[in-house]
Amino acid sequence: MSLELQPLGLLAETKRPLVIAGPCSAETEEQVLTTARELATYGCKIFRAGIWKPRTKPGGFEGVGVEGLEWLKKVKEETGMLISTEVATPAHVEAALAAGIDLIWIGARTTANPFAMQDLADALKGVDVPVLVKNPVNPDLELWIGALERLNNAGVKRLGAIHRGFSTYEKKLYRNLPMWHIAIELKRRLPNLPIICDPSHIGGRRDLIAPLCQQAMDLGLDGLIVESHCTPDCAWSDASQQVTPDVLDFILDKLVIRTIAQSTESLSTLRRQIDEMDNSIIELLAKRMRVCREIGQYKKENNLTVVQSARYTEVVDKRGAQGVLCGMSADFMKTVFEAIHEESVRQQLEIINK
Protein backbone atom coordinates (compact mmCIF):
# COMPACT_ATOMS: atom_id res chain seq x y z
CA MET A 1 0.00 0.00 0.00
CA SER A 2 1.23 3.49 -0.80
CA LEU A 3 -0.11 7.02 -0.90
CA GLU A 4 0.45 9.52 -3.68
CA LEU A 5 2.22 12.24 -1.70
CA GLN A 6 3.91 15.55 -2.32
CA PRO A 7 6.14 17.52 0.10
CA LEU A 8 4.25 19.59 2.65
CA GLY A 9 5.88 22.67 1.15
CA LEU A 10 6.28 24.47 4.48
CA LEU A 11 8.97 27.07 5.22
CA ALA A 12 11.05 25.05 7.66
CA GLU A 13 10.54 21.70 6.00
CA THR A 14 14.08 21.22 4.77
CA LYS A 15 15.55 21.05 8.27
CA ARG A 16 14.61 18.70 11.08
CA PRO A 17 12.69 19.28 13.16
CA LEU A 18 9.80 21.09 11.53
CA VAL A 19 8.35 23.06 14.47
CA ILE A 20 4.75 24.19 14.90
CA ALA A 21 4.04 26.13 18.10
CA GLY A 22 1.35 28.17 19.77
CA PRO A 23 -1.34 27.94 22.44
CA CYS A 24 -3.72 25.05 22.87
CA SER A 25 -6.61 27.50 22.38
CA ALA A 26 -7.01 30.96 20.96
CA GLU A 27 -8.53 32.72 23.99
CA THR A 28 -8.28 36.45 23.33
CA GLU A 29 -6.75 38.57 20.60
CA GLU A 30 -4.16 39.88 23.06
CA GLN A 31 -3.16 36.38 24.18
CA VAL A 32 -2.81 35.14 20.59
CA LEU A 33 -0.77 38.11 19.38
CA THR A 34 1.44 38.26 22.48
CA THR A 35 2.31 34.57 22.19
CA ALA A 36 2.89 34.85 18.45
CA ARG A 37 5.20 37.85 18.81
CA GLU A 38 7.29 36.04 21.43
CA LEU A 39 7.51 32.88 19.32
CA ALA A 40 8.49 34.91 16.27
CA THR A 41 11.41 36.47 18.14
CA TYR A 42 12.75 32.96 18.72
CA GLY A 43 12.48 32.07 15.04
CA CYS A 44 9.25 30.08 15.01
CA LYS A 45 7.83 29.93 11.48
CA ILE A 46 4.49 28.15 11.96
CA PHE A 47 1.92 29.27 14.53
CA ARG A 48 -0.83 27.05 15.87
CA ALA A 49 -3.95 27.76 17.91
CA GLY A 50 -7.19 25.86 18.44
CA ILE A 51 -10.30 27.74 17.33
CA TRP A 52 -12.84 24.96 17.78
CA LYS A 53 -12.14 22.76 20.83
CA PRO A 54 -13.86 19.37 21.18
CA ARG A 55 -14.45 18.78 24.90
CA THR A 56 -15.05 15.45 26.61
CA LYS A 57 -18.06 16.88 28.44
CA PRO A 58 -20.29 19.89 27.71
CA GLY A 59 -19.79 23.04 29.71
CA GLY A 60 -16.05 23.49 29.19
CA PHE A 61 -14.38 26.07 26.98
CA GLU A 62 -15.14 24.96 23.43
CA GLY A 63 -13.13 27.60 21.61
CA VAL A 64 -13.88 31.11 20.41
CA GLY A 65 -14.93 29.94 16.97
CA VAL A 66 -14.71 31.92 13.74
CA GLU A 67 -13.73 35.11 15.57
CA GLY A 68 -10.36 33.57 16.37
CA LEU A 69 -9.55 33.18 12.69
CA GLU A 70 -9.32 36.97 12.44
CA TRP A 71 -6.72 36.92 15.20
CA LEU A 72 -4.69 34.32 13.31
CA LYS A 73 -4.85 36.48 10.19
CA LYS A 74 -3.36 39.32 12.23
CA VAL A 75 -0.58 37.00 13.40
CA LYS A 76 0.30 36.24 9.79
CA GLU A 77 0.17 39.90 8.75
CA GLU A 78 2.30 41.10 11.67
CA THR A 79 4.87 38.32 12.07
CA GLY A 80 4.94 36.60 8.68
CA MET A 81 4.42 33.22 10.32
CA LEU A 82 2.30 30.57 8.65
CA ILE A 83 -0.91 29.92 10.59
CA SER A 84 -2.61 26.64 11.44
CA THR A 85 -5.62 25.28 13.31
CA GLU A 86 -7.67 22.13 13.85
CA VAL A 87 -10.80 21.35 11.84
CA ALA A 88 -13.48 18.78 12.60
CA THR A 89 -16.35 19.55 10.21
CA PRO A 90 -16.78 20.71 6.60
CA ALA A 91 -17.97 24.08 7.97
CA HIS A 92 -14.65 24.42 9.85
CA VAL A 93 -12.76 23.65 6.64
CA GLU A 94 -14.68 26.27 4.68
CA ALA A 95 -14.12 28.97 7.33
CA ALA A 96 -10.42 28.13 7.80
CA LEU A 97 -9.66 28.20 4.08
CA ALA A 98 -11.59 31.44 3.63
CA ALA A 99 -9.40 32.99 6.34
CA GLY A 100 -6.21 31.95 4.55
CA ILE A 101 -5.13 29.24 7.02
CA ASP A 102 -1.88 27.74 5.69
CA LEU A 103 -2.03 24.38 7.45
CA ILE A 104 -4.81 22.37 9.06
CA TRP A 105 -4.79 19.34 11.27
CA ILE A 106 -7.44 16.80 12.18
CA GLY A 107 -7.83 15.74 15.81
CA ALA A 108 -7.70 12.27 17.34
CA ARG A 109 -11.44 12.01 17.99
CA THR A 110 -12.22 12.91 14.38
CA THR A 111 -9.64 10.50 12.98
CA ALA A 112 -11.38 7.69 14.85
CA ASN A 113 -14.64 8.34 12.96
CA PRO A 114 -14.58 7.17 9.31
CA PHE A 115 -17.82 9.04 8.54
CA ALA A 116 -16.35 12.32 9.81
CA MET A 117 -13.11 11.68 7.91
CA GLN A 118 -15.01 11.09 4.67
CA ASP A 119 -16.93 14.34 5.18
CA LEU A 120 -13.65 16.21 5.64
CA ALA A 121 -12.10 14.48 2.63
CA ASP A 122 -15.05 15.57 0.51
CA ALA A 123 -14.76 19.15 1.82
CA LEU A 124 -11.03 19.22 0.98
CA LYS A 125 -11.37 17.77 -2.50
CA GLY A 126 -9.30 19.77 -4.94
CA VAL A 127 -7.78 21.96 -2.19
CA ASP A 128 -3.99 22.35 -2.19
CA VAL A 129 -3.29 22.83 1.51
CA PRO A 130 -1.13 20.72 3.87
CA VAL A 131 -3.21 18.47 6.13
CA LEU A 132 -1.86 16.69 9.23
CA VAL A 133 -3.82 13.78 10.70
CA LYS A 134 -3.49 12.93 14.38
CA ASN A 135 -3.56 9.29 15.40
CA PRO A 136 -6.95 8.01 16.58
CA VAL A 137 -7.55 7.93 20.33
CA ASN A 138 -7.22 4.15 20.37
CA PRO A 139 -4.08 2.33 19.15
CA ASP A 140 -5.42 1.31 15.74
CA LEU A 141 -2.86 1.75 12.97
CA GLU A 142 -5.27 0.68 10.23
CA LEU A 143 -7.77 3.33 11.31
CA TRP A 144 -5.01 5.95 11.16
CA ILE A 145 -3.93 4.83 7.70
CA GLY A 146 -7.55 4.67 6.58
CA ALA A 147 -8.05 8.33 7.51
CA LEU A 148 -4.98 9.28 5.47
CA GLU A 149 -6.19 7.19 2.54
CA ARG A 150 -9.59 8.92 2.51
CA LEU A 151 -7.89 12.31 2.20
CA ASN A 152 -5.44 11.07 -0.40
CA ASN A 153 -8.24 9.54 -2.48
CA ALA A 154 -9.91 12.96 -2.46
CA GLY A 155 -6.80 14.50 -4.02
CA VAL A 156 -5.04 15.76 -0.88
CA LYS A 157 -1.36 15.14 -1.65
CA ARG A 158 0.37 17.30 0.97
CA LEU A 159 -0.26 14.96 3.88
CA GLY A 160 1.44 14.37 7.22
CA ALA A 161 0.67 12.57 10.46
CA ILE A 162 0.76 13.72 14.08
CA HIS A 163 1.67 11.22 16.77
CA ARG A 164 -0.08 12.41 19.96
CA GLY A 165 -0.16 9.12 21.88
CA PHE A 166 -3.09 6.87 22.77
CA SER A 167 -5.71 7.32 25.44
CA THR A 168 -5.95 5.05 28.48
CA TYR A 169 -8.30 4.94 31.44
CA GLU A 170 -5.43 4.10 33.76
CA LYS A 171 -3.30 6.70 35.51
CA LYS A 172 0.15 6.60 33.99
CA LEU A 173 3.23 8.79 33.76
CA TYR A 174 1.93 10.08 30.43
CA ARG A 175 -1.43 11.64 29.62
CA ASN A 176 -1.50 9.50 26.47
CA LEU A 177 0.70 6.44 26.07
CA PRO A 178 3.41 7.08 23.46
CA MET A 179 3.38 3.53 22.01
CA TRP A 180 6.20 4.64 19.72
CA HIS A 181 6.21 1.35 17.84
CA ILE A 182 2.92 2.30 16.15
CA ALA A 183 4.36 5.55 14.79
CA ILE A 184 7.49 3.68 13.72
CA GLU A 185 5.41 1.07 11.91
CA LEU A 186 3.47 3.86 10.16
CA LYS A 187 6.79 5.31 8.99
CA ARG A 188 7.94 1.89 7.81
CA ARG A 189 4.79 1.35 5.79
CA LEU A 190 4.55 4.93 4.48
CA PRO A 191 8.21 6.05 4.31
CA ASN A 192 7.44 9.31 2.47
CA LEU A 193 4.84 10.44 5.02
CA PRO A 194 6.15 13.14 7.42
CA ILE A 195 5.36 12.31 11.05
CA ILE A 196 5.16 15.13 13.60
CA CYS A 197 5.29 14.41 17.34
CA ASP A 198 2.91 16.12 19.76
CA PRO A 199 4.79 15.93 23.10
CA SER A 200 2.24 18.19 24.80
CA HIS A 201 -0.60 15.70 24.46
CA ILE A 202 1.60 12.66 25.04
CA GLY A 203 3.08 14.05 28.25
CA GLY A 204 0.25 16.16 29.63
CA ARG A 205 2.89 17.88 31.80
CA ARG A 206 5.33 20.56 30.78
CA ASP A 207 8.27 18.83 32.50
CA LEU A 208 7.89 15.88 30.12
CA ILE A 209 8.00 17.91 26.93
CA ALA A 210 11.80 18.16 26.62
CA PRO A 211 12.54 14.42 26.99
CA LEU A 212 9.65 13.53 24.68
CA CYS A 213 10.94 15.95 22.03
CA GLN A 214 14.36 14.32 22.23
CA GLN A 215 12.92 10.82 22.05
CA ALA A 216 10.90 11.78 18.97
CA MET A 217 14.06 13.02 17.28
CA ASP A 218 16.00 9.92 18.33
CA LEU A 219 13.32 7.77 16.69
CA GLY A 220 13.59 9.69 13.44
CA LEU A 221 10.32 11.64 13.50
CA ASP A 222 10.21 14.68 11.26
CA GLY A 223 8.92 17.45 13.49
CA LEU A 224 7.23 18.71 16.63
CA ILE A 225 3.93 20.44 17.35
CA VAL A 226 4.21 21.97 20.82
CA GLU A 227 1.71 23.95 22.83
CA SER A 228 3.19 27.28 23.89
CA HIS A 229 1.38 30.07 25.75
CA CYS A 230 2.52 33.49 26.93
CA THR A 231 1.09 32.75 30.42
CA PRO A 232 0.47 28.99 30.49
CA ASP A 233 -0.69 28.81 34.12
CA CYS A 234 -3.61 31.06 33.15
CA ALA A 235 -4.56 29.09 30.02
CA TRP A 236 -8.24 28.29 29.52
CA SER A 237 -7.46 24.74 28.39
CA ASP A 238 -4.63 22.27 29.04
CA ALA A 239 -2.65 24.70 31.20
CA SER A 240 -0.39 22.01 32.66
CA GLN A 241 1.05 20.92 29.31
CA GLN A 242 1.92 24.31 27.81
CA VAL A 243 5.29 26.06 28.00
CA THR A 244 6.29 29.67 27.51
CA PRO A 245 8.00 30.62 24.23
CA ASP A 246 11.36 31.13 25.97
CA VAL A 247 11.19 27.67 27.55
CA LEU A 248 10.30 26.17 24.19
CA ASP A 249 13.29 27.90 22.62
CA PHE A 250 15.53 26.44 25.35
CA ILE A 251 14.13 22.94 24.72
CA LEU A 252 14.66 23.19 20.98
CA ASP A 253 18.16 24.60 21.41
CA LYS A 254 19.20 21.59 23.50
CA LEU A 255 17.85 18.98 21.07
CA VAL A 256 20.34 16.56 19.58
CA ILE A 257 19.34 15.90 15.98
CA ARG A 258 20.70 12.61 14.69
CA THR A 259 21.09 11.51 11.09
CA ILE A 260 18.25 9.39 9.76
CA ALA A 261 19.16 6.14 8.05
CA GLN A 262 18.40 6.22 4.34
CA SER A 263 16.27 3.08 4.39
CA THR A 264 13.28 2.88 6.72
CA GLU A 265 13.41 -0.89 6.27
CA SER A 266 16.82 -1.00 7.94
CA LEU A 267 17.57 -3.39 10.75
CA SER A 268 18.03 -0.54 13.21
CA THR A 269 14.49 0.71 12.53
CA LEU A 270 13.00 -2.72 13.15
CA ARG A 271 15.11 -3.11 16.30
CA ARG A 272 13.74 0.18 17.64
CA GLN A 273 10.27 -1.28 17.25
CA ILE A 274 11.39 -4.37 19.19
CA ASP A 275 12.85 -2.17 21.94
CA GLU A 276 9.58 -0.25 22.33
CA MET A 277 7.55 -3.46 22.43
CA ASP A 278 9.92 -5.01 24.98
CA ASN A 279 9.50 -1.93 27.17
CA SER A 280 5.73 -2.38 27.00
CA ILE A 281 6.03 -6.08 27.87
CA ILE A 282 8.16 -5.27 30.92
CA GLU A 283 5.65 -2.67 32.10
CA LEU A 284 2.80 -5.16 31.75
CA LEU A 285 4.75 -7.89 33.58
CA ALA A 286 5.53 -5.47 36.42
CA LYS A 287 1.85 -4.61 36.67
CA ARG A 288 0.93 -8.31 36.69
CA MET A 289 3.39 -8.97 39.49
CA ARG A 290 1.89 -6.15 41.55
CA VAL A 291 -1.47 -7.87 41.28
CA CYS A 292 0.16 -11.19 42.21
CA ARG A 293 1.58 -9.63 45.36
CA GLU A 294 -1.91 -8.39 46.29
CA ILE A 295 -3.17 -11.95 45.81
CA GLY A 296 -0.32 -13.16 48.00
CA GLN A 297 -1.40 -10.76 50.74
CA TYR A 298 -4.99 -12.02 50.47
CA LYS A 299 -3.81 -15.66 50.71
CA LYS A 300 -1.72 -14.80 53.77
CA GLU A 301 -4.64 -13.11 55.51
CA ASN A 302 -6.97 -16.01 54.71
CA ASN A 303 -4.46 -18.81 55.36
CA LEU A 304 -4.54 -20.14 51.79
CA THR A 305 -1.82 -22.06 49.97
CA VAL A 306 0.21 -20.18 47.40
CA VAL A 307 -0.13 -22.67 44.54
CA GLN A 308 -3.64 -23.26 43.22
CA SER A 309 -3.16 -26.12 40.73
CA ALA A 310 -6.51 -25.77 38.99
CA ARG A 311 -5.99 -22.08 38.39
CA TYR A 312 -2.46 -22.67 37.08
CA THR A 313 -3.70 -25.29 34.59
CA GLU A 314 -6.47 -22.97 33.45
CA VAL A 315 -4.02 -20.13 32.78
CA VAL A 316 -1.54 -22.28 30.85
CA ASP A 317 -4.24 -23.94 28.73
CA LYS A 318 -6.07 -20.71 27.89
CA ARG A 319 -2.95 -18.71 27.09
CA GLY A 320 -1.59 -21.55 24.98
CA ALA A 321 -4.76 -21.57 22.89
CA GLN A 322 -4.66 -17.78 22.55
CA GLY A 323 -1.03 -17.94 21.46
CA VAL A 324 -1.80 -20.46 18.73
CA LEU A 325 -4.57 -18.21 17.39
CA CYS A 326 -1.99 -15.38 17.26
CA GLY A 327 0.52 -17.44 15.27
CA MET A 328 2.73 -18.71 18.12
CA SER A 329 3.35 -22.30 19.15
CA ALA A 330 1.63 -23.87 22.15
CA ASP A 331 5.02 -25.02 23.47
CA PHE A 332 6.36 -21.47 23.36
CA MET A 333 3.36 -20.12 25.24
CA LYS A 334 3.66 -22.92 27.82
CA THR A 335 7.32 -22.01 28.41
CA VAL A 336 6.52 -18.30 28.77
CA PHE A 337 3.67 -18.77 31.23
CA GLU A 338 5.52 -21.38 33.25
CA ALA A 339 8.25 -18.78 33.78
CA ILE A 340 5.68 -16.11 34.65
CA HIS A 341 3.96 -18.46 37.08
CA GLU A 342 7.27 -19.36 38.73
CA GLU A 343 8.03 -15.66 39.33
CA SER A 344 4.47 -15.09 40.59
CA VAL A 345 4.85 -17.93 43.11
CA ARG A 346 8.22 -16.57 44.24
CA GLN A 347 6.78 -13.11 44.86
CA GLN A 348 3.75 -14.51 46.72
CA LEU A 349 6.00 -16.63 48.92
CA GLU A 350 7.94 -13.47 49.86
CA ILE A 351 4.67 -11.84 50.94
CA ILE A 352 3.49 -14.85 52.95
CA ASN A 353 6.84 -15.37 54.70
CA LYS A 354 7.26 -11.76 55.78
Image (spheres, helix red, strand yellow):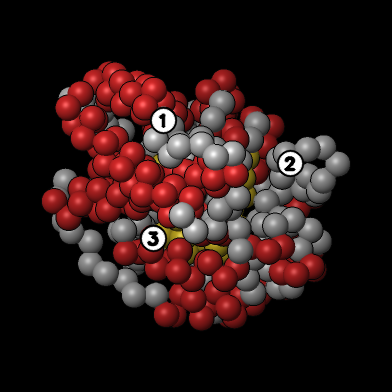
From the image, state whether disc 2 or disc 1 is nearer to you: 1
Front of the two marks 3 and 1: 1
Report the amino acid beneath label 1.
Gln
Amino acid type, residue under disc 3 in the picture: Ala
Q: Where in the figure is residue 287, as x and y percent of width and height? A: 47, 47
The relative height of residue 226 versus residue 122 in the rendered view (above or below) is: below
**Residue 349, which numbered label?**
none
Name the residue beneath numbered marker 1.
308
Q: Earlier in the sequence, mark 2 or mark 3?
A: 2
Q: CA distance from mark 2 to mark 1?
A: 47 Å
Disc 3 packing (10 Å; few <14; some 14–19; many ≥20):
many
Spatial CA distance of label 2 from label 3 is 27 Å
Which mark is drawn over residue 55?
Answer: 2
User: Which residue lies at the image location 37% right of the left edge and 27% below the top edge?
Assistant: 309
Number of other residues with Cα within 10 Å of mark 2, as a class: few under 14, some 14 to 19, many 20 or more: few
Task: Name the residue carrying label 3.
Answer: 216
**Mark sitting earlier along the chain (2/1):** 2
| Foreground pick, 306 / 231 | 306
Query: Looking at the image, which residue is at 17% across and 27% down?
Result: 331
Residue in the foreground of this view, choosing between 31 and 331:
331
Which mark sits nearer the N-terminus, 3 or 1? 3
Residue 262 makes an appearance in the image: yes
